[in-house]
Amino acid sequence: MAYVPDRVVLERYARLLVDFGLGGGAGIKPGDVVQVRGNDACKPLYVEACQAVWRAGGHVIHAYMPSADESGDTQRAFYELASDEQLDFLPERFARGMVDQIDHELVLFAAADPRSLDGVDPAKQMRHQQSRRPVHDWEQEKENRGDFSWTIVTYGTPGMAAEARISIEQYWEQIIKACFLDLEDPVARWREVRAQISAYRTRLNALPIERLHVEGADADLWIALGEHRRWRDGVGSNIPSFELYLSPDWRGTEGWIRFSEPLYAFGTLITGVELEFEGGRVAKAMAAENEPLLHEMLATENADRVGEFSLTDARLSPIDRFMADTLYDENMGGPYGNTHIALGDAYKDTYDGDPAPLTDSDWEQLGFNRSVIHTDIVSTSDRTVTASLRDGSKRVIYADGNFQLDDVDV
Amino acid sequence: MNAGAASLGVMSYEPSQNILERYARVLVDFALGDGAGIKPGDTVRIVGAEETKPLFAEVCKAAWRSGGNVLAELQPTQDERFNMERSFYELASDAQLDHFPAKYRRGLLDEIDHQVYIAGTDYPQAMKGVDPQKMMRRQAAHMPLIGWQQEKDAAGLLHWTIGLWGTEAMAAEAGLSVEAYWEQIIRACFLDDPDPIARWHETIEAIHHYRDWLNSLPIERLHVEAEDTDLWLTLGEHRRWIGGGGRNIPSFEIFTSPDWRGTNGHIKFSEPLYTHGTLVNGIQLEFKDGLVVGVTAEQNAGLIEQIVAAPGGNRVGEFSMTDARLSRIDRFMANTLYDENMGGPFGNTHLAVGMSLNHTYDGDAAAVTDEEWEQLGYNLDAAVHNDIVSTNDRTVTATMRGGSERVIYAAGNFQTEA
């Protein structure tokens, strides 16, 4: 029998998702419809989450999928068997009905076998992902109207723990610590954490930043913020989340960065990623392991542009181990916190205003990148981030893993 | 009961890969599309619980191999610790029981051309003790979906099939070993044959022979006689007998939906009924002018009383006969799909209380109005459909429109020779 976390831990976890994560910190309302998405590798949390929705007076739409294990691997089989037509197929009426029906989407991420897609042609995977693009757009539209919220969390499996080279107990220790499930009232603690993150966010947004310069042994990278940008936190949409992020003007990225953490993409590990940017595009990409997959990913439309820049303060995040899971690794605390960039799609909610009336060409003019890919790559080595302000002055905003913002007037 | 052992993750018996592939092919390339299988580009919804996963995965693969698209819908296994369905009923308010996600259901139904349901559970008693009224209330809330499905079905745009996955716990309910249980599945579905689809085509031909014969007879009423049974049924206008599609795998029965208003007499069912995870034994029903006026059972009578009390549950929705020569099922399986297709020494007769099947209408069902269905004696406004089975020796005598009588079924066989 696989390791199953304590009932108390699972109940707290589920409550946290339904009463805090969804609805942007407010939880769900009675009568709300919640799509719960998971697979049979995370059944204990899936069942608890459904129960939490029902306790809160909500309705569940199930999206429970088969995971890859010894009794079958439908995902891999799909890629091995599918023709181009099958890869491109979008169940449009089904997906449209789903998006119209639901007020919230709860995504429970669990991989029974994180390497289940090893060796599957990445071009096929990206082609299939591309077919899902309209659904993503419909959801974002609904979210922009304020009618849709989502939360993504992780359920640790022995396979994921093995990838991170820790025991399943240690893996869950990180989850419990990071989500404050060791406290009787994790929701109360998350409200405090959100208040702390908000304080940094308010200060960052008060600075008229034009460009950022990331410097360290692993980086000499320039990022241009662009017009009408605001820093956001991910609290609620991601649990846990400690980062502050923004989608910069992709056209202003210059220089190079080496990422200390490995990258998981399409069930495969890419280590030692190093990128060089010229005029906003990746001009050179290297990896110590699985470099062809990195190149394949970069070949996807607009995947060679930055869609996100993010900083995490080491004082906020209790995550101190590599977890081989983007959700955790992009929120890493440890000695120096983390900086990460994402290649691919930009987050429109980092636009400083009402995104609803903006047209595709407005977004393009603002330098918001559009891609079917959004891949976060993380660095936890010591970096200093210096901001060039609009008046020409410079100041350090982040050093030794901490925000340097105490003197900013708000 | 082996549910405890199953929930502890004890590896259960599993058929060979060869058998699984044949099984999946029968479902996808034969059962769907009424014997024709799916076409490239068709969309197939596949539903089954976690414990059916080896077959679930093979069915997905079979659909992809035949050029189809798959909407997969796995359902969590129920056990003592994680019993999601049960906790829904424990937690749900009336508003939650009544919730029908119309936009989601409509979109899903519009999308699909076929539906495969793989039945099978590690925990057949999972719903024991849950208030049946709540379950029926929820079922009633989903009636619009049943109407939409029937509409699409009647228009020939939706095909569906049901197959069974055997588990140790289900076998135990039937008093069989899991190996013996699977032996029934393998034999019944011809999975012991290298070309089970060819065998199914032969079987369907034989079923169609009996079906056409039944349809050639101008039957007005049926009289079912057996020990503790003396029941009259009225066929009604524009009825046809149906059998030999791919909607159930396996299926050997020939059935129709009679005019519910003409049912009179009493029947005792020799087989137990499984529904909502509960076993009901020794059911007896008494009908007067089409309505159930008496219901008793030797065990769990409360559940059959609730079924009869549900909307439309006190009327007959189906009458069915299986010829013992066609069906290779010769053991009680504690599962409606198999028990209602039982062969054995005397074949079986069963009737369903609740929803009528509108494809038994002898014409274009899509053109029939609600009012006309009512006039025809179709019980379509029902929230339940429960088949109850007898395998004891029965004689079925038909009264023809001209007034003549003839025995159409005796000693488990159709009596085609006058």
Image (spheres, coloured by chain):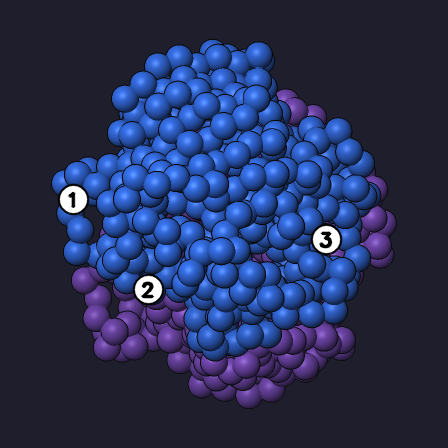
Chain colours: A blue, B purple
| Mark seen at residue A362 | 1
Amino acid under label 3? Ile
In this figure, which residue is indicated by the disc labeled 2? A146
Label 2 element class: loop
* Residue closer to the observer: B323 or B269: B269
Pick whichever of labels 3 and 1 is earlier in the sequence: 3
Q: Is residue B134 visible?
A: yes
Q: Is residue A137 visible?
A: no
| Mark seen at residue A176 | 3
- Same chain letter for marks 3 and 1: yes
Label 1 element class: helix
Pick whichever of labels 3 and 2 is earlier in the sequence: 2
Image quadrant occupied by the C terminus of chain A? bottom left
Is A296 left, or right, of B133 in this rendering?
A: left
Label 3 – label 1 distance at C-alpha: 42 Å
Q: Residues at badges 2 and 1 in contact (C-beta under 8 Å)?
A: no
Residue at image x 33%, y 58%?
A143
Image quadrant occupied by the N terminus of chain A? top right
Residue at image x 80%, y 36%?
A167
* Residue closer to the observer: B150 or B92: B92
Q: Chain of mark 3?
A: A
Q: Where's residue B158, x and y in %?
A: 33, 48
Label 3 – label 2 distance at C-alpha: 30 Å
Amino acid under label 1? Asp
Label 2 – label 1 distance at C-alpha: 21 Å
Label 3 element class: helix
Above or below, B326 against A259 in this view is below
Is B284 left, or right, of B149 in this rendering?
A: right
